[in-house]
Structures are given as structure tokens and as C-alpha cells.
């Protein structure tokens, strides 16, 4: 009832209209266009609707999909856990380590492209770490340095993403942590809880939604990101965004539908994970954990 | 039981309490009164150990007792159920599971919250939340319970009910309570002893009605909003023969404190409880003439420190009269409050609901028992070498 | 209840410092070879230090083919335009979302945050198909519009949160004193939201500056921002050139960051 009264008094929510229009036109419009395009029959006429998706049902693509989804999840988890640990460490002392906090933020200012490059030149077999290893006497030949880029395990990619996403996690988590600590510290102390108990039983549980939300953002981002895998991942089986981009730009306009179809598969994956998390958030909301 | 000696606490960078002495007796309910910002919450947090001690010391009589603190807001952990909230402190102290369950179940019953064990705080009402907050601390069986305006966020009937409930529990279990509030009626309902705190300093300590009737300073009197409060000079102006020129000490035991110089500055304020003043209408033919001897008699209440009953007048101090006009009649819980404009000030007279009501504008004659005037000093008395509060905490 | 010896939080312990130190090292170490490469001539393996210094990469950067200033200006111009769009679209949206509840609130909020959760290549391709129908004038504007999609969700999210922390009570009080909406915005909201607004703005600028694919798609590869200039060198492994472009990219960002820190320090209470 209060809602209706407010609406009558203030009228429409004018403020959101410009942004909403923008999103509807560019984002939704673009998306819908892409979806429609991907289902179109192909140029020769001997291809039926949805041919692009049938093309994707090959083991080749599925392998790529597996790599993409798996690595994205790995990056999200790795950044999430390390970011959380760092955030906790940063906020623990009485006057928290604010200077360190600002220091850890700086990778946020640099493009992913640069992160790829920076980590590459560290981790290449001809990179800086390799040279240090030589100087320290650990290796004698360039080949003895482990292959960390363009490798099948994707270590370089993981580290490059971590370099960017851990600061993002820290940026996301630290304000939350500080606020939660300010709110609950006194109460928990007055009941006799130690620092560790307060952290484990009060702060972290209340913190869960924000943390999982942050990891999801990273997951969705890495799922569709181009630059780092383009520069650092091996060509076979290759990440889906890279393959999609290739199909889109290099192999002629007929392949565009395939490229879009590939990306839409990624979208579906992201949405499924998203729905799962949304459900979890609802459950947590009912159990009192709110942001 | 617990003795705070010259303690100092700061909060948020300011020194809120600088030099405070307090003594708490085992098994008593000590109510700490004071306006907001006076440092009451800081004191509680300091005793609980949530804030560090900046100076002075906390001395326990015997072995150190357990302290529990209940905040103004319930502050229940939103992600834990009622039962989990109650068990929190026990878990923190690693009480074994079975013992924990037993105590929590017993507390749920005491709190009258059976059936709500699995609920989350956002599913509880204000009163229920506050009960859980109390239970959370009580389940730890503290020796000293610190309450920071525990019921101020609840409406009156709930507040009264919970205060009564807590008072009963305290009498049963026998733990000591330091209860902070800014509500006078709550204080009077539960206190064994009362203290008034302002601006980080403890101004006066004593039995509730003592503190109320004999405030230690004008500050305290103003906090209580004591009615009919005037400086001695004023009283002398109105009733020169009926008011002692010189100050006396508090007439509690009738002795003049030793070592004290009779100083006109001492006890230079006086107030009169509104239920001790009477009014009578001035009959038309009497207006302009000195008041007649006949009055509608009403009982003078038995009380402090006078023991006069009825209309028997004291030899030395006959009752004083003053003419005035009724300004307003206000309803009160226990009757009415009549406001009379006389002698240039507003007088408050309390009467019972069965007494006749005057009309606004009615000329009346006030009957003022000058011997009942409670005298008190304008400023806190300072004794050599000891703070006033310490002295006032006398046995 | 114990007798609590008062230690609110312990100071650092060795393990904590070690872990934080390792992380700091991980983040900072790659910068060293970057700087070295920018000034290196021939730097073969396994030298840790360049045996030969040369400024030729820097010379290239500032030559006409290097387009140092052009790239920088393009990047920052687009970033500023993106910021303007974000402010115009995002501030009213965040404000309305935070202060009013209306039917469809949840859907709208989800819509605004959707680009964060949708893989970006999808968004980009969709945008391309959409925008390829349009005339190619006002290149900067169309690129800025493209940059709004990855930036606006963050901006709205940050600002919404700040508005929520602010609450609505102060504005209500101001309104009962007769202030108009615009006055309330200028005198009550803006000063109090300033830190959040600043942080959101800096984030928008940083994200816009770092866009590669978006700019490529929206301009057909014609608007040469710094990332576009850098990418070919990065993919072909020209370490020294990439290093030089990276440093050239970084210095204005560093200045912005320092200004932000200074401003934040001045108005800090939290």
C-alpha cells in the first residue's frame, strides 16, 4: 500500500528512464539481434535454421567449451580465495593497513591486455624469471624453464587473470569487511568471543553473499574475455572467445553466425550459473544474510 | 563487589570519562541516570572490557566476576536463529554441547519464547528481539549484568512488563545489575541505589528517593526537573521569617557535618515537592484582606523528613501564604498538576484525581510549608582530599 | 565471560606480513622488467639486466607512426565522453533505484547489472551488428556509447550503494524546509556522495581507457586508442615497444590516481 501512495505522489520513476532506454536499445537490442542472427539460415540456402549450432556440436568445440568454463571457474575460485585472505589480512590490525590497500589496487588501473603482456614477459621461457633462474644457477638452458604460457595447463593465463582479479576482489571485499567488523565487533566481544571466533561465526557468514557475488562477476567476465587468452593461451584447443573472434573477423561473413552461436553458448552457461546463485541468494536472504 | 577507582575511558578519540569512582554492592540493582552524552554507555563498555582502561583500576572484591553487557539495540546476529543466538556466548567459551543445549532450552522457557526457537531475527518483534538479547547474556550466568537502556526502544507497556520481569529474575538469581537509563520512572521502579552521571562525572550516589529529594547540586536538580525550585535568596524575599537565613547541612541525620564552615553559599537552593503545597480559593469577601485561618484541611503526606500530620503547625515555622492566579490544570497519571502564577513565578501543585479542580484564572491562596523545603547546594560540595561522589556513596 | 585483557586487534604477525608481502611481490615484480625493456636495446637471454641501453623504442613512440600523443588523446577523450554519459545516465538511475520502490524494480536493477554477468564478447558482437547499420560519423561518440556498456553497471552499482547508505531522511528534511529537487541534489546529496561519486568516476575512466575489443568493434579499428596501438606489438612479441607504450599509458593514470588519493585524503573521515 505504501508503494502505491508513493507512486501517486511522485509519479513515475523518471530517473531510471534514460539509463533504461539506453540499456534496452543497445544492450537488449544488440543481444536480441545477435540471437536472431545466429539462427538464420545460411547464405547458400542449403543450410537450415540453426545450422550454426549444429556445427558447434563437435568434440572440438566442446573441448574448447570445457577449457573455457573450467578455467573461468578456476580463476574465479583462485582470485576469490586469495582475495578474501588478503582482504582479511589487510583489515585485521587496529589501524588497518590502509597504505597497503592502496598499493594493492594499482593493477585495477591497467588493461587486461597489459596484464597479459606483463605476466608474459615474466613467465616466458625467455622471460625475466627464467633469466633470474639462470643467474641463481637453477637452470642452464632456456628450455629447462617450465612452459607456463601457451601451455596446456594454462598457468600463465591463470596468473595473468589473478594479477588483475585479485585486486578487484580486494577492492570489493575490504569495505564490506570493515563495515561488518565495525558493526559486530563490540557485540561479539561483549559475549566473550575471541577475534577468530568473531571472524568465523559472525563476519564470514554475513559476508558470504558479497563474496560469492564477486566471484560470479569474475567468472562471467573471464568466460567472455578475449585479450588474455588471445595473448597467452595455447591455440589448441583454444578458448571459446578467441575462436569466436577469429570466426567473426577472419573467416568471412558467413561464419559470423557461428561466432555468435559460440558466444551464446557461453551466455547460456553464465545464465545457468547465475540462476543457481540467484537461488542461493534467495535462500540466504531468508536466513537473514543480507548485503 | 566491584570497585572502580579513579577510572578513565575514552571513546572515539575523546576522553569521555576522566576520573570516576564507583562502588557496586553484591546483589544490588544500581541505576545510573543521566542525559544522553553523559558517558553512561562508555562506562558500561569499559567495565565490560570492550573499551580499554585509560587510567585507574577495576578492583573486584574476591575473585573476578563474570560480566555481561546488553546494548540499547538488540544487536542479534541476523544469520543465526534464536537458539543459535542464545548459544553464541556459550559456544565462544567452549561449553560442551549438551550443557549448552540444556541451558539454552531453559532460557527459552524463561524468556517465554517457546515455539520461536527456529526463527531468525528479522522474523521477530521488537520485544521478542530484546528478550533474546537479554537471554543471550543471562544464559552465561554473569555475576554483574550491565544494561544500557535495554528497553528504551520499546513502547511503555512492554517496557514496564520487561522491567518487572527482569527485576523479579534479579531477585531470584541474585546477580548484581548496573542499569543505565534516562527514564525516571524506570529508575524508581527497580533501583536499590541510584547514581546521577553528567558529562563523564558521577555527581551523586544514594538511595533513589534520597537522591531525588536531596540532589547534590543544581545540575542534578535540573536533570530531575525538580519543581518549585528557587535560590535561598528568593525564598527569603518571599518569606523572611519562615526561612532560615543561614544554611544548614542536609537534615538527614540532623547533624551539621563536621569540619564544614557554615557557608552561605552552601545549600543555597531549595525546592518543594508539588504534593506538599495546597491551594484554596480566596472567597470574594476575603480578597484583598489577609488570609483567614480556616482552610479546607488536607492531610500533609507523611514522609521525609517531616512527621507532621494534618494541620498541626510547627511552632517555629508557621505555614506561609501567597496569593496567585491559576494558570492551567494538567492531567497527570496520579491526579492533576495545577499551575499557579504567584510571586512572579509558576508554582506546581499536585493533587489527587478526587480533589476539586480549580478553574483557570481563579484567584487562589497558596499554602506553602516552608519547613518542608529541601535545601541543596548549588554546586557539588568538595571535601579536602576526596571526591564528593565517594563521600556521597556513604553507607 | 573471561576477564578480557584488552587487545582489540593484534598487530601484524609474521605469517600475515609474509603472505601480504608475497602478494605484493606478485603484483609489483612484473613492473621491473617492464621498465627495463622500455630502455633496452638488444637484451638477450639470460641477462637479467640489459647489457645494451637504447632509446629507440621511445623514439618510435614519439614518431609520427608511433602516434604517442594521438593515441593518448584519443583514449582520454573517449574516456571523458564515457564519463559524461555515465554521469548523465547513471546518477538519476542510481538515485531513483535507491530511493524509490516501484513495480519492476527488481527487473530494472537486474537489467542494469546484466552486462556484468553476460560474457562480454556476446555484448560486443551484438553491439556491432546493431551499430553497423548506423552512419559512421561522430566516431568518438559512438565509441563512447560502446564504452558505456561495460562501465555503466559498475557506476550504477557503486552509486546505488552509496545512496542507500545515505538514506532518504536528510532529503526529506530538506524538502520539508522547502528546498527544490535540484537544490537538494546540489546542497545535500552531492557533498555527501562525493567520495562514492569520485570512486565511481575513476573506475569508469579506468575501464574505458583499457577497452580494446569494444573500441575496435565500435570504430571498425579506425579510432586509435592506446590499447589498439599496443595490441599488435603485444601479439607479435615486440617486448620493448609494448613496454614503451605501457609506460606511456601508465603515467596519466598514475597522475589521476594520485589526484584521487589526495582528494580522498582531504575529505577522509573513513
Image (tube, grey):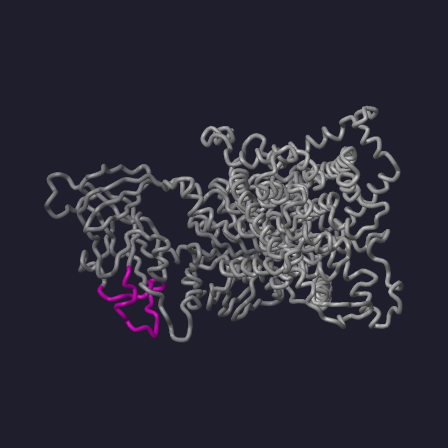
Image quarter in which the C terminus of chain A is found: top right
Instruction: Identify which residue, C97 or A285, lies in the foreground.
Output: C97
Residue at the spot 51% in from the left edge and 33% down from the top edge: A13
The answer to whether A87 appears left or right of B278 in the picture is: right
Q: Is residue A96 magenta?
A: no
- Residue B96 % position (x, y): 75, 53
Residue at the spot 76% in from the left edge and 34% down from the top edge: A253
Q: Is residue B258 magenta?
A: yes
Magenta-colored span: B245-269
Q: Is residue A289 above or below residue B220?
A: above
Residue B246 visible in image? yes
- Residue B142 % position (x, y): 61, 56
Instruction: Identify which residue, A6 or B287, lies in the foreground.
Output: A6
Q: How many marks?
A: 0
The answer to whether C258 appears left or right of A219 in the picture is: left
**Magenta span dominant secondary structure:** loop
Q: Is residue A40 above or below residue B328?
A: above
Q: Is residue A215 above or below residue C54?
A: above
- Residue C161 % position (x, y): 57, 45
Instruction: Identify which residue, C104 or C114, lies in the foreground.
Output: C114
The answer to whether B194 appears left or right of B225 in the picture is: right
Q: Quadrant of residue A252?
A: top right
Instruction: Identify which residue, B150 or C151, lies in the foreground.
Output: C151
Residue B82 visible in image? no
- Residue B181 % position (x, y): 47, 52
Residue at the spot 76% in from the left edge and 53% down from the top edge: C235
The answer to whether B195 appears left or right of C98 in the picture is: left
Amino acid at each position: 500500500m505504501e508503494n502505491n501512495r508513493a507512486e501517486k505522489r511522485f509519479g513515475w520513476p523518471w530517473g531510471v528512464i534514460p539509463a533504461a532506454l539506453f540499456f534496452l536499445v543497445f544492450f537488449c537490442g544488440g543481444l536480441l539481434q545477435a540471437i536472431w542472427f545466429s539462427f538464420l539460415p545460411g547464405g547458400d540456402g542449403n543450410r537450415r535454421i540453426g545450422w550454426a549450432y549444429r556445427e558447434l556440436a563437435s568434440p572440438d568445440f566442446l573441448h574448447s567449451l570445457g577449457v573455457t568454463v573450467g578455467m573461468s571457474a578456476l580463476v574465479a575460485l583462485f582470485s576469490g580465495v586469495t582475495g578474501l585472505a588478503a582482504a582479511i589480512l589487510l583489515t585485521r590490525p587496529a589501524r588497518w593497513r590502509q597504505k597497503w590497500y592502496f598499493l594493492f589496487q594499482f593493477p585495477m588501473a591497467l588493461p587486461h591486455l597489459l596484464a597479459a603482456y606483463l605476466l608474459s614477459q615474466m613467465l616466458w621461457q625467455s622471460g625475466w624469471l627464467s633469466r633470474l633462474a639462470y643467474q641463481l644457477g637453477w637452470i642452464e638452458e632456456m628450455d629447462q624453464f617450465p612452459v607456463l604460457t601457451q601451455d596446456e595447463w594454462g598457468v600463465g593465463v591463470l596468473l595473468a587473470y589473478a594479477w588483475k582479479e585479485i585486486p578487484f576482489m580486494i577492492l570489493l571485499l575490504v569495505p564490506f569487511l570493515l563495515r561488518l567488523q565495525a558493526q559486530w565487533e563490540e557485540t561479539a566481544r561483549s559475549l566473550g568471543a575471541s577475534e577468530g571466533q568473531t571472524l568465523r561465526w559472525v563476519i564470514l557468514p554475513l559476508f558470504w553473499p558479497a563474496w560469492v557475488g564477486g566471484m560470479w562477476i569474475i567468472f562471467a567476465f573471464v568466460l567472455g574475455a578475449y585479450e588474455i587468452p588471445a595473448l597467452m593461451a595455447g591455440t589448441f584447443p583454444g578458448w571459446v572467445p578467441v575462436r569466436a573472434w577469429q570466426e567473426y573477423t577472419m573467416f568471412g561473413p558467413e561464419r559470423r553466425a557461428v561466432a555468435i552461436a559460440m558466444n551464446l553458448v557461453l551466455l547460456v552457461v553464465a545464465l545457468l550459473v547465475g540462476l543457481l546463485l540467484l537461488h542461493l541468494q534467495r535462500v540466504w536472504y531468508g536466513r537473514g544474510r543480507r548485503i | 563487589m566491584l570497585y572502580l577507582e579513579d577510572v578513565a575511558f575514552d571513546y572515539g578519540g575523546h576522553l569521555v570519562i576522566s576520573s570516576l569512582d564507583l562502588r557496586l554492592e553484591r546483589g544490588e540493582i544500581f541505576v545510573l541516570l543521566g542525559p544522553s552524552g553523559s558517558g553512561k554507555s562508555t562506562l558500561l563498555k569499559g567495565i565490560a572490557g570492550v573499551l580499554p582502561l585509560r587510567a585507574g583500576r577495576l578492583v573486584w572484591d574476591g575473585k573476578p566476576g563474570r560480566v555481561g553487557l546488553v546494548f540499547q539495540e538488540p544487536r542479534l546476529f541476523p544469520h543465526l536463529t534464536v537458539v543459535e543466538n542464545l548459544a553464541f556466548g556459550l559456544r565462544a567459551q567452549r561449553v560442551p554441547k549438551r550443557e549448552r543445549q540444556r541451558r539454552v532450552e531453559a532460557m527459552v522457557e524463561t524468556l517465554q519464547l517457546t515455539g520461536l526457537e527456529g526463527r531468525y531475527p528479522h522474523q521477530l518483534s521488537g520485544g521478542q528481539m530484546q528478550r533474546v538479547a537479554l537471554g543471550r547474556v543471562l544464559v552465561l550466568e554473569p555475576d554483574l549484568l550491565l544494561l544500557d537502556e535495554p528497553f528504551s526502544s520499546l513502547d511503555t507497556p512492554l517496557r514496564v512488563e520487561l522491567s518487572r520481569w527482569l527485576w523479579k529474575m534479579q531477585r531470584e538469581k541474585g546477580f548484581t545489575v548496573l542499569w543505565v537509563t534516562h527514564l525516571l520512572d524506570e529508575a524508581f521502579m527497580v533501583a536499590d541505589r541510584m547514581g546521577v552521571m553528567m558529562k563523564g562525572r558521577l555527581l551523586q550516589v544514594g538511595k533513589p528517593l534520597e537522591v531525588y529529594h536531596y540532589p547534590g547540586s543544581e545540575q542534578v536538580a535540573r536533570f530531575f526537573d525538580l519543581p518549585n525550585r528557587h535560590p535561598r535568596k528568593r525564598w527569603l524575599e518571599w518569606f523572611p521569617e519562615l526561612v532560615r537565613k543561614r544554611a544548614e547541612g542536609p537534615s538527614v541525620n540532623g547533624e551539621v557535618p563536621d569540619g564544614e564552615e557554615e557557608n552561605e553559599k552552601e545549600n543555597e537552593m531549595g525546592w518543594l515537592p508539588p504534593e506538599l503545597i495546597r491551594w484554596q480559593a480566596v472567597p470574594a469577601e476575603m480578597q484583598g484582606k489577609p488570609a483567614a485561618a480556616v482552610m479546607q484541611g488536607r492531610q500533609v503526606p507523611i514522609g521525609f523528613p517531616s512527621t507532621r500530620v494534618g494541620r498541626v503547625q510547627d511552632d517555629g515555622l508557621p505555614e506561609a501564604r501567597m496569593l496567585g492566579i491559576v494558570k492551567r490544570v494538567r492531567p497527570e497519571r496520579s491526579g492533576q498538576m495545577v499551575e499557579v502564577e504567584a510571586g512572579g513565578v509558576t508554582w506546581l501543585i499536585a493533587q489527587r484525581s478526587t480533589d476539586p479542580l480549580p478553574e483557570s484564572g481563579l484567584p487562589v491562596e497558596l499554602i506553602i510549608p516552608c519547613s518542608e523545603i529541601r535545601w541543596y547546594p548549588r554546586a557539588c560540595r568538595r571535601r579536602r582530599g576526596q571526591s564528593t561522589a565517594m563521600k556521597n556513596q556513604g553507607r | 565471560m573471561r576477564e578480557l585483557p584488552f587487545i582489540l586487534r593484534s598487530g601484524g604477525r609474521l605469517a600475515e606480513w609474509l603472505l601480504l608481502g608475497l602478494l605484493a611481490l606478485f603484483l609489483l615484480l612484473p613492473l621491473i622488467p617492464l621498465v627495463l625493456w622500455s630502455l633496452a636495446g638488444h637484451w638477450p637471454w639470460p641477462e637479467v639486466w640489459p647489457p645494451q641501453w637504447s632509446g629507440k623504442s621511445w623514439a618510435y613512440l614519439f614518431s609520427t607512426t608511433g602516434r604517442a600523443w594521438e593515441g593518448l588523446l584519443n583514449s582520454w577523450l573517449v574516456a571523458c565522453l564515457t564519463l559524461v554519459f555515465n554521469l548523465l545516465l547513471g546518477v538519476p538511475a542510481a538515485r531513483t533505484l535507491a530511493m524509490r520502490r516501484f513495480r519492476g524494480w527488481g527487473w530494472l536493477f537486474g537489467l542494469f547489472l546484466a552486462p556484468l554477468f553476460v560474457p562480454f564478447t556476446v555484448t560486443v558482437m551484438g553491439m556491432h551488428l546493431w551499430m553497423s547499420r548506423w552512419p559512421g560519423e561522430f566516431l568518438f561518440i559512438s565509441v563512447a556509447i560502446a564504452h558505456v556498456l561495460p562501465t555503466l553497471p559498475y557506476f550504477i552499482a557503486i552509486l546505488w550503494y552509496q545512496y542507500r547508505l545515505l538514506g532518504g531522511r536528510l532529503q526529506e528534511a530538506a524538502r520539508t524546509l522547502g528546498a527544490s529537487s535540484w537544490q537538494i541534489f546540489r546542497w545535500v546529496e552531492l557533498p555527501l556522495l562525493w567520495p562514492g561519486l569520485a570512486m565511481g568516476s575513476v573506475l569508469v575512466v579506468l575501464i574505458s581507457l583499457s577497452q580494446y575489443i569494444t573500441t575496435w568493434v565500435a570504430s571498425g579499428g579506425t579510432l586509435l586508442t592506446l590499447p589498439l596501438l599496443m595490441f599488435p606489438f603485444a601479439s607479435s612479441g615486440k617486448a620493448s615497444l609494448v613496454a614503451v607504450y605501457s609506460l606511456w599509458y601508465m603515467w596519466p593514470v598514475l597522475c589521476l590516481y594520485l589526484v584521487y588519493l589526495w582528494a580522498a585524503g582531504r575529505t577522509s573521515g573513513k
